[in-house]
Amino acid sequence: MAPVYPTLLLCVYGFFTSLRPSEPFLTAFLMGPEKNLTETQVVNEIYPIWTYSYLLLLFPIFLATDFLCYKPVLVLQAASLVVTYAMLWKARSMLAMQLLEFVFGLATASEVAYYSYIYSVVEPAHYQRVTGYCRSMTLFGSAAGSLVGQLLLSVAKVQLVHLVIITLASAAVAFVPPWFLPMPKRSLFFHKSPGAVKGRPRCSSSSTRLEKMEDSESRVPLNVSTVSEAALDCYRCHTLLSWSLWWALATCGYFQIINYAQPLWEKIRPSQGYEIYNGYVEMLSTLLGALAALLVGCLPVSWALWGELALCVLSLLMAVCVFVMDTLKNIWVCYSSYILFRTTYMLLITVATYQIAASLNMQRYALVFGVNTFVALLLQSLLTLVVVDSSVLGLDVLTQFLVYGAYFAVISVIFLLAGLCKLASRRRSEQKPLPGSRAESETSSSARSTLSSV
C-alpha cells in the first residue's frame, strides 16, 4: 500500500497550487483599469519574460531539486506562487509585472520537484497509482479554479481583482503542506543507494555496454560524462527519438498557444465591452484533455507501426485549429478550436509519455524527460524572441497565430516524411528474402542451372 500521509499532502498541495480563479482572465486584468497596460506591453514585453526565465532556471532547479531531495524546492515553489500573486494584486508598473513573470518562471521550473518527490518515498510498485492521484488533483484543481472564476465573474459580478485575491489565498493555503512532508533519504542521481535503479533500458542495440554503464551509475554520483553518454544511448532508439522529437516541437508550440490565447480572445472580444467566458473554456479544455489522456489505452492504434503517421495527422489537425482561431475571428469558433487543440495535444503527449517511459528505467526516464523539456523551452525561447519580443519582430497577436499555425503544419510534414520512410523501410525488409527461404532456394537453383548449361 502506498504511503498515505505524503500522498495526501501532495494531493492537497497540487490542488491548491492549481486552484487559480484569476488565471483565465489574466490578460483582461492586466489590460483593464487595475493595471492599464497596453496590448503591446502585455504581449510583447511582459509575457516573454516567463519563457526566458523558465528556460534559464530549469536546469539549475532540476539539479537543485535532486541534490536537496525535493522538499526544499517544493517550499520554494509554494513561496514563489505566493509572491507572484501578491505582486499581481498590489504592484502597478510594467517593470514590476516583468519581475512577476520572472518569479512565476521560478515557480514553474520548480514543478519538477512536485512530480518527482513521490518517487523518492514510495516503492516502484505504487508509482502509477500515486502519479495518477497527484496528476488528477492538479487537473481537478485547475478545472475547479477556472469554473469558480467564471461563476464569480458572470453570476456574482465580482471584479477581476477579487479573483486575484482568491488565487493568492489559495497559494497561501498551498504554502503549508510542503513543510510537513517527510524528507526523502534518496534521490535519482546525487543521493542514490546502490541497486536503487531497477530495470533495463530496452532502447539500444548495445545492451551489454548499457548494462555495465547502468551498474556503474547505481554506485557513483552524477557527472557530466555519465549523463551525456546515457542520453546519447537512449536517443539511438528510433521510437524514442521520434516521440521525443514530437514532444519537443509540439510542446514548444503548445506553450505559445496557451500563453497567447487570452490576448487573441481579448482582440476578438474585448472584455471591456463584452462578457467573456474564458473560465468555461479553460475548464472544458482541461477536463476533455484529461478524458482524452484516460482513453488513450482504449484506442485501437498500433503506435509502434503507425505512430509517425498518427503524429502527422493529429499535428495537422492542431495546425488547422490554430489557423481557424486566427482567421475566422469568431469568439465561439475560437473557443471551440482552442478546446479541440488542447484535447488533441493532451492525448498525444500522454501517448508520447508512455512510449518513452516504456523503454526506460526510472533514472533514464527522468533524464530524457528533462532533456525533452529543455529542448522544448529552448525552441520556445527562440520562437518568442523572434516572433513576440518587441526587440526583434514584435508581431501583433493575430500575425503570431498565423506563424504558430504554419509551425504545426511544418511538424505535420516532418512526421509525414518520417512515417513514409518507416513504411518504405518496413516493406523493403519484408520483401527481402531470408536466408534459407524458398525464394532464395529458387534463385540459387536457377543460378546453378544457368551455370550447368554454360
Image: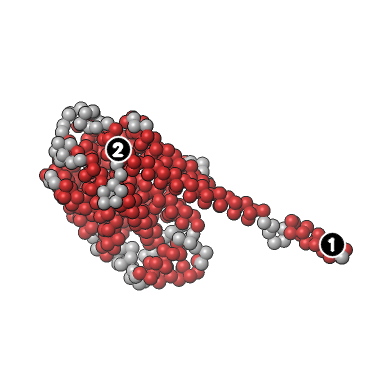
The numbered disc on residue 349 is none
- The extreme right residue here reads 453
Q: Is residue 226 left or right of residue 93?
A: right
Q: Position of residue 267 (x, y in %)?
A: 27, 35
* Image location of residue 45, percent across then percent down: 23, 48
What residue is shown at x 21% (from left), y 44% (from top)? 41
Q: Secondary structure at mark 1?
A: helix
Q: Is residue 207 above or below residue 245?
A: below
**Label 2 to label 1: alpha-carbon separation:** 75 Å
In the displayed structure image, the side of residue 152 where residue 132 appears, left or right: right
Q: Is residue 439 left or right of residue 89?
A: right
Q: How is the image coloured?
A: secondary structure
Identify residue type, mark 2: Leu
Query: x, y (%) of residue 359?
Result: 46, 57
- Split into 4 quadrants, where in the image is the C terminus? bottom right
**Residue toward you, 230 or 331:** 331
Q: In the image, which is nearer the foreground, mark 2 or mark 1?
A: 2
Q: What amino acid type should be assigned to the residue bearing mark 1?
A: Ser
Name the residue tied to disc 2: 264
Residue located at (37% from left, 56% from top): 375
368 vs 264, nearest the viewer: 264
> Within the image, what quadrant is residue 273 found in?
top left
Asked if labels 1 and 2 touch by Cβ distance under 8 angstroms, the answer is: no
Element under label 2?
helix
Q: Residue at x 40, y 71 (%)?
A: 216
Q: Name the residue nearer the viewer: 391 or 451.
A: 391
Along the line of sight, which residue is nearer the eye, 365 or 336? 336
Give the residue pinned by disc 1.
Answer: 449
Badge 2 density bin: few <14, some 14–19, many ≥20, Cα 10 Å? many
